[in-house]
Image (tube, rainbow, N blue to C red):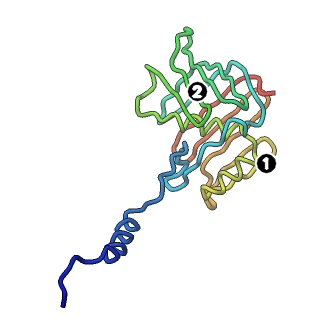
């Protein structure tokens, strides 16, 4: 028997096996917020807004028994969202912008571990087109029920988030995470 170098074809199946075993799916890098421990809500694009707004708002927030009050100027339309937060003296508390799949957030007041995706998600739950919102929530395993001016988001039979809207006030209560806030402005 003649000794020689193994043929190149012997290594081809091994190379294919190695390459296939190393293949992985590309990570989903879309901006998202977990509305529950399992429900990953992918943020909608700005053009999904129900009605553009350019207004001042007064915000009252409550979390773990503490209340916070501040003012905001919000410009939100089909191209993006810009939010500037102020204290009662008019000093800036932070700026947030969302456009082209990118969020920029800066604040010297809010905790560094505050993920701005959650602010944008709550804003979208309040003000984005209910048809598009319902579809995005269903992909997350959640359901949206709208009765009059109230939006309710459920995981199965469990009420997670409740939003009540009037012409001058929007109130969001996150029953799961234990926080709420009220937005006051001219939402008509």
Q: Badge 1: how crowded within 10 Å, few (<14), some, or many (20+)?
A: few
Q: Residue at x 64, y 54 (%)?
A: 154
Which image quadrant: the C terminus? Answer: top right
Q: Residue 11 occupies which quadrant of the picture?
A: bottom left
- In three-dimensional space, the C-alpha distance between marks 1 and 2, rounded to whole angstroms, equals 31 Å
Q: Residue 95 occupies which quadrant of the picture?
A: top right
Counting residues from the start of the chain, the first of labels 1 and 2 encountered is 2
Left or right: 133 in relation to 28: right
x then y, percent, for residue 41: 58, 49
- Asked which secondary structure carries label 1, the reply is strand
Identify the disc placed on residue 74.
none
Query: Which of these two is toward me, 124 or 89?
Result: 124
Q: Residue at x 52, y 33 (%)?
A: 116
x then y, percent, for residue 104: 52, 28
Q: Is residue 143 above or below residue 115?
A: below
Left or right: 66 in relation to 54: left
Which image quadrant: the N terminus? Answer: bottom left
Q: Is residue 31 above or below residue 24?
A: above
Residue that numbered label 2 is attached to: 97
Q: Residue at x 54, y 15 (%)?
A: 87
Left or right: 99 in relation to 4: right
Q: Are marks 1 and 2 in contact (CB under 8 Å)?
A: no
User: What is the residue that sits farthest to the bottom in this orientation?
Assistant: 1
x then y, percent, for residue 142: 63, 56
Identify the disc placed on residue 147.
1
Between disc 1 and disc 2, the foreground one is: 2
């Amino acid at each position: 028997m003649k000794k020689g170098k193994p043929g190149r074809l012997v290594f081809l199946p091994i190379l294919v096996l190695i390459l296939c075993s190393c293949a992985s799916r590309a990570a989903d890098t879309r901006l998202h917020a977990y509305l529950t421990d399992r429900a990953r809500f992918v943020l909608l694009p700005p053009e999904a807004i129900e009605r553009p707004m350019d207004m001042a708002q007064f915000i009252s927030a409550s979390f773990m028994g503490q209340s916070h009050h501040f003012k905001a100027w919000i410009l939100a339309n089909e191209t993006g969202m810009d939010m500037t937060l102020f204290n009662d003296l008019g000093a800036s508390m932070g700026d947030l912008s969302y456009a082209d799949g990118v969020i920029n957030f800066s604040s010297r007041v809010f905790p560094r571990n505050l993920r701005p995706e959650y602010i944008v998600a709550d804003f979208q739950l309040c003000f984005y087109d209910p048809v598009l919102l319902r579809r995005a929530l269903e992909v997350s395993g959640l359901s949206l029920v709208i009765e009059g001016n109230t939006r309710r988001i459920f995981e199965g039979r469990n009420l997670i988030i409740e939003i009540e809207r009037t012409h001058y006030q929007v109130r969001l209560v996150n029953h799961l995470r234990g926080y709420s806030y009220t937005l006051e402005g001219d939402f008509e």
